[in-house]
């Protein structure tokens, strides 16, 4: 990639990744408010807003982070499978995306129930706890790629080691 394109791709990746962190933090705040609020109107509003944030903010940002991360890894010397930290970031991004997509049905269900009825603190307590747990866990998991990106721990994969040594074994002109 040209330096300008690389910087643009990096900016898009960082923005979508940081945006995901912020959106999940906001989602978590709404999930906690929906679970603990004594005011049924607040709980209803929280679950309706959670569905909108999940569908129209978190899902697009997670996919943008995945795509821009792939572009970054394939378009730079880091590569996709050369370093363990890059592979770990890819795995975590796919994991977060999968869990999010699996949780969308529950989030939609809670929003539908909230739109139709008034929720009391006891209603669907077990189901209402799931978004809190998943959002808190997701937030912690999303912090790991941030740390990996900043520290870039050493460690080549077997593929990366082989590629590095193939380059050093090439005849010199």
Image (cartoon, rainbow, N blue to C red):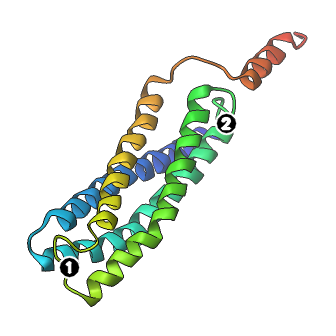
Residue depicted at x 42% and y 70%:
106
Residue that lies at the very extreme toward the bottom in this rendered image? 116
Camera-side residue of 22 and 120: 120
Query: Is disc 2 surrounded by few (<14), some (14 to 19) or many (20+) residues within 10 Å?
Result: many
Position of 135 relative to 35 (above/below): above
Q: Quadrant of residue 126?
A: bottom left
Residue depicted at x 74% and y 18%:
161
Is 41 left, or right, of 131 in this rendering?
Answer: left
Q: Could you tell me residue 41's position as x and y percent? A: 14, 80
Residue depicted at x 38% and y 38%:
143
Is 57 left, or right, of 5 in this rendering?
Answer: left
Camera-side residue of 135 and 160: 135
> Which residue position is annotated with label 1?
119
Mark 1 or 2: in front is 1
Camera-side residue of 83 and 43: 43
Position of 56 relative to 157 (above/below): below
Q: Which mark is residue 80?
A: 2
């Amino acid at each position: 990639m040209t330096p300008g394109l690389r910087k643009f791709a990096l900016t898009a990746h960082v923005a979508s990744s940081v945006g995901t962190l912020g959106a999940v933090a906001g989602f978590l705040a709404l999930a906690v408010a929906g679970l603990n609020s004594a005011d049924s109107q607040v709980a209803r509003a929280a679950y309706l807003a959670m569905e909108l944030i999940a569908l129209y903010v978190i899902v697009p940002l997670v996919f943008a982070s995945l795509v821009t991360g792939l572009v970054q890894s394939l378009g730079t010397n880091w590569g996709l499978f050369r370093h363990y930290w890059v592979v770990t970031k890819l795995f975590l991004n796919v994991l977060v995306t999968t869990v999010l997509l699996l949780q969308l049905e529950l989030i939609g269900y809670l929003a539908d129930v909230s739109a139709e009825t008034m929720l009391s603190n006891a209603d669907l307590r077990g189901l209402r706890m799931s978004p809190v747990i998943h959002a808190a866990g997701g937030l912690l998991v999303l912090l790991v790629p941030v740390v990996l990106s900043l520290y870039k721990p050493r460690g080549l994969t077997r593929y990366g080691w082989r590629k590095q040594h193939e380059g050093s074994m090439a005849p010199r002109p």
